[in-house]
């Protein structure tokens, strides 16, 4: 299904920073841990040097430089070092202090090295390649006892911990939102990080939340406490209270950082105590409200059920991690997603608002966190080789796994077979997608339901789109007036922060094609296509938010050098002011030389077109002859959204488009059976899948895309000589079984 070249979660970016700069700063050891604004890179090295710059989920991350002393050899892999028996007998720093000088001299180098690895990370040879893991990852692998003993090394976890270290290092970031597969080990990794953080900090608090209070308690008692108990004495502070606490783990006397200088004596200042705690809270919107947290581990965040709301909780909890504008704590959040109506919808919003490619003027994402998704094939039990790498496809000969079992099948092949077997049970299939997603849209796949549209075709198209390298088919960008002079020519430029997604632009001779009649500008490419628009009139609403403005462009059947019957533009956004939105819509229409059909119940955008001389671009409602239009409709154009006839016609237009141009045409009515549809805008497809005709206000993309289809099919809605009400009965589908079934 998916192009395996997409399995590049982790990419080394060659020469991202000029070699001369790297060499100079490495020599002086002047690279500083944290975000480097000059090169837009997060440095996670703590020794003043950098090596590879890697790209993970929108972040450029600079790793430490590799040690020259590391001997590389094939067939070597991660192996946990056994804890020396002599040290295993020591339980506290006090027992260490009582040991003879000769004993301390023997083991001080070992202990110092463990502290260094904890702080700076660790390099090891993995099948002939120098491989870096962060200090937190090292603590997880070397010192975290889990249900199966000690964790296996997995490349997916290395990527996770590098990304997490970048989140900790970046002062613009409140933490991470990790969208995961089932049994990825996140609960243990989060618990290990809770213990690791708490045992290094003074006068701090680490908190735990989960989908229910009992789940948070179980994570605390079954994971956090045992991990703490099994730490070696030199990392383990003295606890206050019971050995196996149920509510709070309190560290009062710290584990001293043993070095050659202090190995024989412990200063009184080091015995003052950490006064650091780890605890859990019941699941509630106001959990940890008003408290200061150094770390919050947020497990199963995508499974919060009403009345609890993960969005409301995060708004409250976020304040626990900051002092004014300064971020003083981080959140490690991870989860699979429930169905959208069972908590998944709010988690999806939180995840999408954590996209590092979308930042405000302060350089922060909307949520303040950074999102990370690791596909199923990277982290599936039974498909990880002994070097920690996933076996994507069935190998030509057996591969030895990390558990020493032989692997003769690929993770993707296994997944595809499971999907095939579940085709007749949509609910089971969607649950499988959510538990073992290969794409973000799989992770947020909703339960099947009665829909006015053909969900089978919609999901076929979404899955196909996910298999594409999006940058090869869709360009994100912005429109601007040439030289900043309005009403001249419009230019389109690729822009990773642009609000437009475009799959086709016309040839130069068709761009900015305008016809002027009686001082009014008309579109010169009306024969090629049209736009539909769902606008808004008010720049802001009380408390922020408000619906998005939306614009869609679609082509007609044509003989020019342009696609036929294809959506070529999607815009779903809410800029800072309504005027920005109006101008961006106008520029798109001018650039393509195509008319626009907009709802006239929010008329400011129509006034914008008229006042600038573009009334000719604004289409009149197609279901009425000119002399039957109201005075306002004659003045501005547009179509009302309140008319039941219009609502029915609008839904029917989308339904027809889906049948002809989306997903597979199994009956070969419109195209070959194996030819996939050409609708590349997944955001719009997902909006169609959820659309409720009785509650249309939430579906901006559906409204504008439907108006675009109506605009190119206006002849279907033109009234006959005898005017009568439009009556279009659109179908409903029963989305059970292999294919969607038309309800008669």
Image (tube, helix red, strand yellow):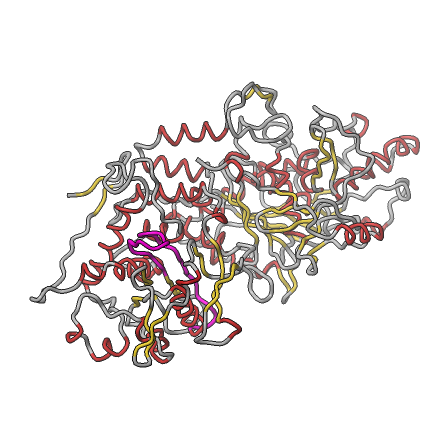
Q: Which quarter shows the N terminus?
A: top left
Per the rendered image, the range of residues in magenta is 552-578
Residue 731, given in percent of the width and then of the height, sits at 19, 48
Q: Which quarter shows the C terminus?
A: top left
Residue 671, given in percent of the width and then of the height, sits at 28, 40
Instruction: Verify whether residue 567 appears in magenta.
Output: yes
Counting every numbered tag in the picture gives 0
Position of 694 with respect to 571 (left or right) is left
**Residue 560 versus residue 681: which sits nearer the camera?**
560
**In the image, residue 172 above or below residue 379:** below
> In this orientation, does residue 68 appear?
yes
**Residue 516 versus residue 441: which sits nearer the camera?**
516
Residue at the front extreme?
Answer: 509
**In the image, residue 650 above or below residue 74:** below
Quadrant in the rendering for residue 699: bottom left
x 61%, y 51%: residue? 59
């Amino acid at each position: 299904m998916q192009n395996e070249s997409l399995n590049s979660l982790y990419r080394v970016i060659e020469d991202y920073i000029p070699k001369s700069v790297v060499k100079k700063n490495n020599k002086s050891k002047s690279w500083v841990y944290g975000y480097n604004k000059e090169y837009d890179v997060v440095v996670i090295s703590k020794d003043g040097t950098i090596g590879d710059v890697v790209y993970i989920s929108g972040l450029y991350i600079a790793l430490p430089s590799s040690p020259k002393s590391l001997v590389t050899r094939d067939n070597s892999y991660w192996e946990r070092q056994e804890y020396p028996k002599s040290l295993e007998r020591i339980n506290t720093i006090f027992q260490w202090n009582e040991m003879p000088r000769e004993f301390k001299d023997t083991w001080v180098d070992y202990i110092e090295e463990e502290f260094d690895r904890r702080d700076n990370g660790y390099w090891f040879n993995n099948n002939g390649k120098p491989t870096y893991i962060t200090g937190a990852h090292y603590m997880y692998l070397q010192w975290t006892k889990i249900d199966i003993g000690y964790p296996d090394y997995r490349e997916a976890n290395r990527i996770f911990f590098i990304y997490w270290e970048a989140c900790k290092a970046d002062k613009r970031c409140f933490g991470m939102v990790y969208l995961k597969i089932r049994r990825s080990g996140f609960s243990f990794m989060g618990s290990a990080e809770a213990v690791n953080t708490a045992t290094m900090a003074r006068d701090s608090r680490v908190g735990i939340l989960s989908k229910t209070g009992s789940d948070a308690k179980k994570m605390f008692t079954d994971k956090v406490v045992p991990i703490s108990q099994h730490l070696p004495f030199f990392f383990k502070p003295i606890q206050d209270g019971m050995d196996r606490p149920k509510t709070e783990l309190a560290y009062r006397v710290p584990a001293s950082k043993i070095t050659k200088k202090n190995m024989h004596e412990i200063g009184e200042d080091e015995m003052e105590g950490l006064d650091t705690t780890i605890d859990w809270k019941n699941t509630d919107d106001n959990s940890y409200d008003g408290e200061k947290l150094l770390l919050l581990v947020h497990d199963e965040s995508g499974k919060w059920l009403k009345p609890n709301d993960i969005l409301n909780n995060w708004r409250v909890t976020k304040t626990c991690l900051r002092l004014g504008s300064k971020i003083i704590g981080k959140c490690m959040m991870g989860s699979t997603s429930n169905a959208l109506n069972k908590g998944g919808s709010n988690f999806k919003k939180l995840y999408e608002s954590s996209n590092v490619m979308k930042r405000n003027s302060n350089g922060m994402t909307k949520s303040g966190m950074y999102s990370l998704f690791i596909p199923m094939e990277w982290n599936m039990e039974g498909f990880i080789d002994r070097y920690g790498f996933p076996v994507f496809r069935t190998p030509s000969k057996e591969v030895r796994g990390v558990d020493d079992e032989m692997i003769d099948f690929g993770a993707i092949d296994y997944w595809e077979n499971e999907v095939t077997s579940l085709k007749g049970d949509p609910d089971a299939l969607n649950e499988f997608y959510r538990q073992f997603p290969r794409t973000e849209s799989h992770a947020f796949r909703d339960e099947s339901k009665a829909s006015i549209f053909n969900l089978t075709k919609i999901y076929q198209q979404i899955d196909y789109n996910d298999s594409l390298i999006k940058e090869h088919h869709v360009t994100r960008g912005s429109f601007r007036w040439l030289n900043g002079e309005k009403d001249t020519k419009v230019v389109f430029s690729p822009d990773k922060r642009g609000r437009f997604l475009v799959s086709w632009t016309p040839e130069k001779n068709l761009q900015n094609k305008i016809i002027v009649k009686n001082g009014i500008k008309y579109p010169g490419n009306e024969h090629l296509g049209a736009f539909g628009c769902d606008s808004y009139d008010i720049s802001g609403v009380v408390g922020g938010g408000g619906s998005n403005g939306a614009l869609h462009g679609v082509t007609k059947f044509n003989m020019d050098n342009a696609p036929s019957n294809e959506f070529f533009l999607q815009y779903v956004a809410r800029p800072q002011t309504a005027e920005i939105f109006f101008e961006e819509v106008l520029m798109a229409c001018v650039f393509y030389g195509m008319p626009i059909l907009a709802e006239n119940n929010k008329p400011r955008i129509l006034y914008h077109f008229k006042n600038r001389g573009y009334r000719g671009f604004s289409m009149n409602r197609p279901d009425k002859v000119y002399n039957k239009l109201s005075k306002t409709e004659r003045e501005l154009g547009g179509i009302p959204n309140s008319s039941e006839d219009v609502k029915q016609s609008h839904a029917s237009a989308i339904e027809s488009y889906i049948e002809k141009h989306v997903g597979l045409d199994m009956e070969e009515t419109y195209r070959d059976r194996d030819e996939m549809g050409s609708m590349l805008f997944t955001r719009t497809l997902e909006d169609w899948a959820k659309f409720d005709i009785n509650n249309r206000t939430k579906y901006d993309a559906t409204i504008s895309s439907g108006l675009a289809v109506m605009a190119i099919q206006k002849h279907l809605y033109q009234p006959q000589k005898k005017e009568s009400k439009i009556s279009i009965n659109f179908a409903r589908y029963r989305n059970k079984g292999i294919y969607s079934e038309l309800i008669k």
